Amino acid sequence: MTDLYTPTDRTTATRTRKRMRYEREAAHAILDEAYDCSVGFVVDGEPRVLPNLHVRIDDTLYLHGSTGARLGLAARGDGVAVCVTVTLLDGLVYARSQFNHSANYRSVVALGIARPVTDAAEKLRVLYALADKVGPGRSTDSRPPTRQELAQTTVLALPLAEVSVRARSGGVGDDPEDLDLPHWAGVLPLRTVAGPPVTEPGVAAAPPSYLPGSPSQWQTPVVLEGRHVRLEPLTPGHAPGLFEALDDEEVWRHIPYPRPRTPDALTEDIAGVLRGQWLGQRCGWAQIDPASGAVIGMTTYHDIDTNLRALGIGHTMVGRKWWRTGVNTEAKLMLLERAFDVLGAERVFWYTDILNERSQNAIARLGASRDGLIRRQRRRPDGTWRDTVVFAMTADEWPAAARRLRDRLAAG
């Protein structure tokens, strides 16, 4: 196999030849990055162009569809002649003249005969690869197709033989006589960004880390096991138990959010944490009683800054039954161990209401220093202004604080 596709009459450019390429590696990269393609074919003498999902395995492009769809029906027997196109739009190019407006893009055109995949093992291999393309590991984290579902699914194989790549990058191509015009010219970059996953009602599992756009380990909670408390990734499924544990006005007294009055309202609060998690700003845990498995509270990392290697610990609530036990100390120790020893944080900080003396004393006992006061930092749920006390611990202070916390837990 050569590094280049051989040009044909159908893949040779008739204009802007400098944008045409035939490198196999470039074509594969575009096909692998894109999730969807457009498939053109002819039905009863008329053109059809349909959207499709695809996956590349080696030098074959596989298309997915239903046995009863137009493409599947047209491919019965010896296959169907197709033209498959994939385009990744990287930017809009604004010239001084409308004629020279353009776009930065990468595209692939593949031509040939797409044949039906009839071998069951090959078909299953392709469907697994398609599942893993939308999330590496998804094929093992979902139910495989049944025999009936396989029979209802068409998989077409298109050998990548007649292939071309066309791409544009760079800036504006204005004519020399237009350079003095007063109009703005430049490039507006575009990119596809995965948004926060929306968990289906009734699903207790947290969004898996293999989803496209998944946050880094700074925003990805893991199970942290302790003797007094277990921290596990926060999910909407924790809402009923969490609501029961936190159904106490005193627990919410200094929390800067309105107290949820129903489990559904608390589910919305959890959803907000998860949205922030996916956007790289937060990381949430449920606090669990190891003995009973009951949900007893929640806590988060917040205001995560991976560039400065800093994060806050907050939005922490524990049912009053577990106050003045080893739960808070052990939970904070595990969160600090993860921050400093695993993530390599340089600074961990806490925000707390100036009126919340209990919280200030608890943070100070962790070994954090009071860094200052942010006046009128936010409004409380009752509308009054809150002055916020800032505590922090640095990586240099962490080893001594860790020894004191571990000694305190061992003594208790």
Image: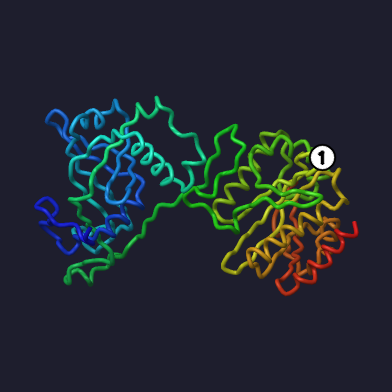
Would you place residue 309 above or below residue 91 in this image?
below
Q: How many marks?
A: 1
Which of these two is toward me, 161 or 274?
161
The residue shown at (22%, 29%) is: 76
Please provide percent x and percent y for residue 343.
Answer: 63, 64
Residue at which label 1 appears: 248
Q: How many neighbours does mark 1 have within 10 angstroms: few (below 14), some (14-19), or many (20 or more)?
A: few
Q: Quadrant of the C terminus?
A: bottom right
Kindly state the secondary structure of the residue where label 1 is placed: loop
Q: Quadrant of the N terminus?
A: bottom left
Please provide percent x and percent y for residue 140.
Answer: 50, 41
Q: Which of the 4 image quarters holds residue 386?
A: bottom right
Would you place residue 203 above or below residue 194 in this image?
above
Which of these two is toward me, 352 or 7?
7
Q: Which of the 4 image quarters holds residue 50?
A: top left
The residue shown at (57%, 47%) is: 275
In the rendered image, the residue lying farthest to the bottom is: 396
Q: Amino acid at mark 1?
A: Asp
